[in-house]
Amino acid sequence: MVGVSIAWHLARRGYQVTLVDRRKPGQETSFGNAGLIQREAIEPHPFPRSWFDILRILPNRAIDVQYRLTAMVCEAPILWRYWRESSPQAFERIARAYASLIVHCTDDHQALIAASGADALINREGWLQVYRNLDTLGAGIATADGAHRSHGVEFEACDRQQLHELEPALSNDAVGAVWWKNAWSVSDPGGLVDAYARSFLAEGGTFVESDVLSMAPSGSGWTLRLRNGTLTGEALVLAAGPWSIPMLKNLGYAIPMFVQRGYHMHYEPAPGVKLNFPIFDHDRGYTLSPKRMGIRLTTGAELARADDPSCMRQLLAAERAAREIFPLAKRKDDLVWRGARPCIADMNPVIGPALRHKNLWFAFGHGHQGFTLGPTTGRLLAAMLAGEPTQTDMAPFRADRF
Ligand SMILES: Cc1cc2nc3c(=O)[nH]c(=O)nc-3n(C[C@H](O)[C@H](O)[C@H](O)COP(=O)(O)OP(=O)(O)OC[C@H]3O[C@@H](n4cnc5c(N)ncnc54)[C@H](O)[C@@H]3O)c2cc1C
């Protein structure tokens, strides 16, 4: 989503742009996510710091967060930084910057949706943050009210009856919801990226399907060594999601990125039953959303190394919890899908010039909201590359802030 959106904006401005990906556009992390365009997500996800949360997560049986000890040890310096950046004072500053991007997400998506004719993939009815407990529902409504006052997030508080009118198939475990009303959802996230990529081609862009083996400065520009040849250009934008840091290995950048992995599986609904909205089961921590392929269950965060083998435990726990609340029938996929959210220790993405090298630009590390923030990043990065001022202060996203 991020790379395609940047390519689209640059092509729109008249640059001659080549988009390189080893797979077709939108086949990796941007394929398998929950497909929410999260106008309500004005804060990133901090490291859990309350004793209650730490003791809840420590036995490694929580549904929303699981971890592998090997990753905790290997990534300890980055996770330690993530912990420190999640202190209340640091988090307030970080969230302010994060929100400065999020508030533009639907407008920025709209520009690409209109150009690509992708309207049929978009649902603008919002999504439901469902609660099983009246205390957590009350706290959720208070948070939503704050987000409304500070950042124009639209919501409606639903009691049990209102929620069950919206979603008649939910069980009585669901006691209420916050209905995020100006967030959007997508019935086929990979399909949306593909539509944006087609629009990029229609703007005169070129797509090359190849593995980038290395990148090196050449003259005032850059040369990519591809599996099937080389490619030279005046400027290079690196937007390889969770693979961005390995690709930078030989260029001397120390950007503290780690991954929070997640899984998905599709299900049939029980006969005669429909899921009308995406729902996030707040008190368990997974999402169910109606997709073209079936009802997609997506899991929360798994702190593991990017290449560790998949582990079904978190998905199975989420599936059990989901069956308590919604009548899922059989699974539709033979294999579970796995992706990796590219997360920076201070929770803000890196967007801007590389600073140690001329004509190298970075756009990665969008964590839990890269699908939401791709088009906003594309608009801002294209303006920076063109030497234009941006109305958004880009200092919090600089590559040399670490
Ligand atoms: C379970 C789950 C649910 C999520 N739900 C949401 C959600 O509802 N809303 C939201 O906003 N975000 C969500 N996210 C996060 C979001 O999916 C990511 O932040 C986003 O997809 C990252 O986009 P990207 O373009 O940076 O990376 P990617 O989509 O991973 O794209 C990176 C691209 O780089 C290419 N690449 C990598 N290495 C090379 C190479 N050497 N040569 C050539 N090409 C290469 C890959 O093929 C890939 O196409 C979720 C994530 C997960 C895992």
Image (cartoon, helix red, strand yellow):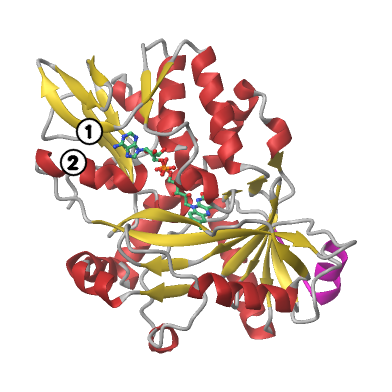
Image: magenta residue range = 155-166
- Residue at image mark 2: 248
**Helix, strand or loop under label 1:** strand
Q: Which mark is residue 213?
A: 1
Q: Position of residue 332 (x, y in %)?
A: 68, 57
Left or right: where does residue 51 sit relative to residue 266? left
Q: Quarter of the image holding residue 258?
A: bottom left
Left or right: where does residue 43 sit relative to residue 249? right
Mark 2 belongs to which amino acid?
Answer: Leu
Would you say residue 157 is visible in this rendering? no
Q: Residue at x 73, y 75 (%)?
A: 325
Q: Position of residue 324 (x, y in %)?
A: 72, 79
Q: Nearer the viewer, residue 165 or 335?
A: 335
Marks 1 and 2 close (CB-CB < 8 Å): no
Q: Position of residue 350 (x, y in %)?
A: 29, 44
Q: Position of residue 228 (x, y in %)?
A: 28, 22
Calculate the distance from the C-alpha at mark 1 to the C-alpha at mark 2: 11 Å
How packed mark 2 is, by other alpha carbons closer than 10 Å (few <14, some 14-19, many 20 or more), is some
**Helix, strand or loop under label 2:** loop
**The image quadrant in which ligand 1 is located:** top left
Q: From the viewer's perspective, is residue 316 above or below residue 346?
A: below
Q: Quarter of the image holding residue 295?
A: bottom right
